[in-house]
Amino acid sequence: MKIGIDGRAAKWYHGTGIGTYTNQLIKSLSKVDCDNNYLIFIPQCDSIDNLQSNFKMELVESAPSKSFWDDINVPNILNNADIELYHVPQNGVGLSDNIQCKKVITLHDIIPLKMPETVSDRYLKIFNDELPKILDSCDGIITVSNFSKADIASEFKFPADKIYVTPLAAEDIYRPMSKCQSKSIITQKYGIQEDFILYVGGFSPRKNILGLIEAYSALPNKLKETFKLVITGRKGPSYSKYKNRAEELHISNNVVFTDFIPIEDMPLFYNATEVLVYPSFYEGFGLPPIEAMACGTPVIASNVTSLPEVCYESALFIDPNDIDALSYDIERVLSNSLLKLTMVKKSLTRSKTFSWNKTALNTISAYEAIINS
C-alpha cells in the first residue's frame, strides 16, 4: 500500500490528545510496518526522527498562528498520483478537495455536536460547516472507542461497517517510578510539598473541574489538610471561574493550578499523586486515565461516554453530576490502603491491554479494508 498521512498535528498540536495521537501513530507505524510506503506531510523546518526508510517526508508551507484549527484548516495539496489512501488524523479538518485517491479521517469524537458550548467558536464553525462535506467524501472513518463509533454512526448515519475502532494507549514514558523521588522533584520544580489528588486535562467546562473542586471541598477537613488538589493544564478562559469557586469555598490555599506541565514531567505527577480524578462529562477516549494506570496510579472516573469502556473494571466510577458520590470515593481511596493497593494492581493490568503498536496494527488493517472496499 501507498499511504499519505497529514502529520502537521504531531508538530503543531503536540501535548494534546490529537497531537499525541498523530505523533505516536506515525512512530508506531514505522515500528511495525516495513512493507508499505508512507508519505508524511509535516510543516517546513520540522521532521519526525528515527522513521524507517519506507517513510518519506513532504514539507508543507507553515505559518502557525495562535489558532490550531485555523492553521490546520489550510488544506494540503496532494499532487502525488501514486498515493492509494490519504489519512487526515485531526477530525478531517484540512482534508483537501482535489485528492483523487481514497480518503480516511480519524474522527475522535463529536463533542462539538453534543456539547457545543464547550468548544471554541472557531472550531465549532469549522466542525458544523465542513464536517458533513468531509464525511461525504470519506471512504472510511477511524475512531478511538466503540462508544465514539456508535455516536458517529448514529449522528451522521455513516455506515458502521466503514467505521474502524483503534483504541489509544499511553506513551512509553508513562511507567511506575519511585513515588518518593517523583515527589522530591515536584517539590523542587513546582513547590508542591504536600501529598495530593491530581487532575490532568484541559480546562473545558465538559471536564467538570467545578464539580471536582466542590467534591474536594466536601472532604473532611483532616483530609483537606493532608492532601492538596493539584489541577494541571494550561489556564484557559474558564480558569478565573475555577479559581473564584475555590476562593468562595475557602479552599484556595489547598487548590494548586500548575498551568501547563511539559510532557516529560507528567509521569512525575502521575507517580507522585495518591489518585487521579477524571470526572469528565464527555470523552471520545480519555488518555489521562490510561496514562495514570500505566504508572500504577488509582483512578476515579466518570461512568459516562467512553470512560467505562476504556477503564473497564480497574477504576472507581462515579456519576459526574453526583458531587457527594465523587467526594465519597475520593475519601475512600485516601483512607483505605487495601482498596488503593487493589486499584494499583488493576491499573497496571488494564494499561497493559493497550499499546501504540496495537493501535498501528489496527490502523493498517483499516487501511487495507478501505483500499480493498
Image (cartoon, helix red, strand yellow):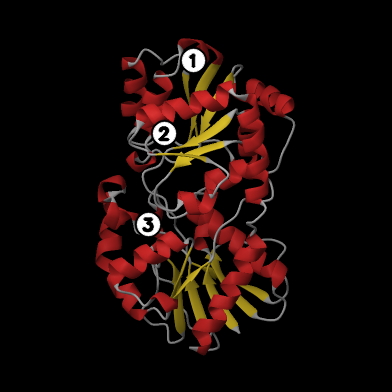
Find out whether the residues at labels 1 and 2 contact each other: C-beta distance under 8 Å. no
Tell me which residue sits at (47%, 50%) in the image. 308
Which labelled disc corresponds to residue 224? 1
Which amino acid, mark 1?
A: Lys
First in sequence: mark 1 vs mark 2: 1
The image position of residue 223, as x and y in percent, is 51, 15
194 with respect to 241 (left or right): right
- Residue of label 3: 69
First in sequence: mark 1 vs mark 3: 3
Residues packed near mark 3 inside 10 Å, few (<14), some (14 to 19) or many (20 plus): many
158 with respect to 329 (left or right): left
Q: What whole-number distance in Å separates the C-alpha atoms at marks 1 and 3?
A: 40 Å
Q: Residue furthest front?
A: 338
Residues packed near mark 2 inside 10 Å, few (<14), some (14 to 19) or many (20 plus): some
Tell me which residue sits at (46%, 86%) in the image. 101
The foreground one among 8 and 225 is 225
User: Please, what secondary structure does the residue beneath circle 1 have?
Assistant: helix
User: Please, what secondary structure does the residue beneath circle 2 have?
Assistant: loop
Q: Quadrant of residue 338?
A: top right
Which amino acid, mark 2?
A: Lys
- Residue of label 2: 235
Q: What whole-number distance in Å separates the C-alpha atoms at marks 1 and 2?
A: 23 Å
Q: Is residue 286 above or below residue 192?
A: below
Which amino acid, mark 3?
A: Trp
Find out whether the residues at labels 2 and 3 contact each other: C-beta distance under 8 Å. no
